[in-house]
């Protein structure tokens, strides 16, 4: 069951994959975002290839960010994202390890949450080029609760390395 309201909020979802044809995995997840209840996709960033985050030896990732307008509350949207991951075969294993698909709820309106299940805004946004660069592409004027305007957050293109694919 999903919880919805009459008011739409802007939400941003980070997508990443480095297994089993990552570009195809990202596109498949995006197509599933487009059919979520009470939700529409407003914008999708370009795809970016980025070096892996963390200390695990693995292939580069393909990343993107999607801007949604949704009537789903943050917890319900998170459950929908977890369902998409599961349907695509995501198995949770090593932290920062390889994955077929990763969907992170980055921002949900003005929601601030620090529960075990849901942290909003997503921690580490300001330190992760693979989130910041696509987010700056599609929503530079968006203000992230506690972080400021997206356009004002510095991106370090060299650590980890990142490049636009399309």
Image (cartoon, rainbow, N blue to C red):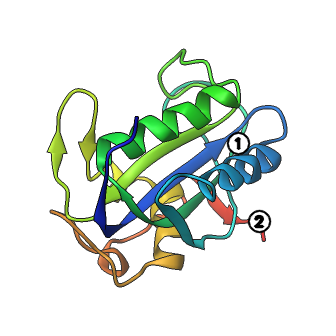
Q: Give 39 or 30, whichever is nearer the viewer.
A: 39
Q: Residue at x 32, y 68 (%)?
A: 9
Quarter containing the C terminus:
bottom right
Residue 97 falls left or right of residue 22: left
Q: CA distance from mark 2 to mark 1?
A: 12 Å
Element marked by disc 1? loop
Q: Residues within 10 Å of mark 1 (few under 14, many from 20)?
A: some
Quarter containing the N terminus:
top left
From what the image shows, is residue 105 above or below residue 18? below
Task: Give the percent coordinates (x, y) of residue 146.
Answer: 15, 62
Q: Residue at x 54, y 61 (%)?
A: 65
Q: Which mark is residue 60?
A: 1
Q: Residue at x 50, y 33 (%)?
A: 82
* Residue placed under numbered mark 2 in the picture: 165
Residue 57 falls left or right of residue 36: right
Q: Work out whether residue 119 can be spotted.
A: yes
Residue 121 falls left or right of residue 114: right
Q: Give the mark, 2 or 1, whose residue is nearer the N terminus.
A: 1
From what the image shows, is residue 156 above or below residue 151? above
Q: Residue at x 22, y 27 (%)?
A: 116
From what the image shows, is residue 134 above or below residue 35? below
Task: Give the percent coordinates (x, y) of residue 101.
Answer: 64, 36
Q: Residues within 10 Å of mark 2 (few under 14, many from 20)?
A: few
Q: Give 78 or 7, whichever is nearer the viewer.
A: 7
Q: Which mark is residue 15?
A: none
Task: Give the percent coordinates (x, y) of residue 75.
Answer: 31, 40
């Amino acid at each position: 069951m999903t919880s919805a309201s009459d008011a739409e909020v802007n939400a941003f979802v980070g997508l990443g994959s480095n297994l089993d044809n990552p570009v195809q995995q990202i596109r498949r997840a995006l197509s599933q975002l487009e059919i979520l209840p009470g939700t529409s996709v407003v914008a999708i960033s370009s795809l970016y290839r980025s070096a892996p985050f963390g200390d695990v030896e693995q292939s580069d990732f393909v990343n993107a960010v999607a801007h949604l307008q949704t009537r789903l509350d943050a917890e319900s949207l998170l459950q929908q994202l977890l369902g998409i991951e599961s349907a695509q075969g995501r198995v949770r294993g090593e932290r920062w390890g390889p994955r077929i698909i990763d969907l992170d709820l980055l921002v949900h309106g003005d929601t601030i949450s620090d529960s075990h299940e849901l942290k909003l805004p997503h921690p580490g946004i300001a330190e992760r080029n693979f989130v910041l660069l696509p987010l700056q592409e599609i929503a530079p004027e968006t203000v992230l609760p506690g972080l400021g305007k997206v356009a004002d957050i510095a991106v370090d293109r060299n650590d980890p390395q990142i490049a636009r694919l399309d």
